[in-house]
Image: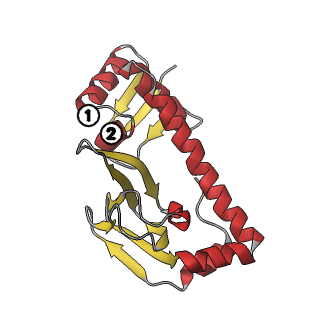
Amino acid sequence: MTDFDNESLERLFARRPVRKLARGERLFRQGEPAAAVYLILRGRLRMIRHLASGDRMTIHTGRTGELFAEGALFSDVYRCDAIAAEPTRVRACGKAEMLAAIGDSPSTMLALLEQVTHLLHHARAMRELRNIRSANDRVLHHLYLSASKDGAVAFDRPLLEVAEDLGLTHEAYYRALAALARAGEIKRMGRKIRLIK
């Protein structure tokens, strides 16, 4: 995603104080009143949903320059926890003010729509990936989707989180990477991976 660049939305968030979160610190909890939308100034926030089984599932990771928790605009409560995956800085805009700004400015509405559309495309791609049964195929397809034009993939987060996003244990993810490297499909250099074919 490109950096957050809509001037009207930038102005809307610029008036807000910066909140700093340490790694592992919670921004909000599942079930709390949905009061604000956030702009991530720096860092990463993970949306973690608590399931009825007691398990937790990461449903989205927000990154620098992105809006976060925009679903709060049309919800009474937050549907997940928001936890900083690394030291993170955010600004918050209250739900009522954000809705008023969207109603007053077509450019603000289009900027929000662009962000939400990007997130929807990403969510659909991740769902498609999770439906691939073979771990090796799932990992390889994800690498192709993540690669730059020269075939390089540099993750901005630990591979453990990448594995979780793909619905794999970290052991299964590392086994798949090792198998793909042995097969000559990829070359690993720490968190950087290069596609060979």
Which x, y percent locates residue 111?
68, 64
Q: Which mark is residue 160?
A: none
Of mark 2 and mark 1, the one earlier in the sequence is: 2
Q: Which mark is residue 170?
A: 1
Give the image quarter of residue 89: bottom left
Give the residue type at disc 2: Glu
Give the image quarter of residue 9: bottom right
> In percent of the image, x 32 and y 31: which residue is there?
168
Is residue 65 something that shows in the picture?
no
Which x, y percent locates residue 154?
43, 42
> In percent of the image, x 59 and y 80: which residue is there?
97
What residue would you read off at disc 2? 164
Q: Is there a contact, CB below 8 Å, between mark 2 and mark 1? A: yes
**Local SS, label 1:** helix
Is 146 displayed left or right of 107 in the figure?
left
For label 2, the crowd category at 10 Å Cα-Cα, with few meaning under 14, some 14 to 19 and many 20 or more, is some
**Local SS, label 2:** helix
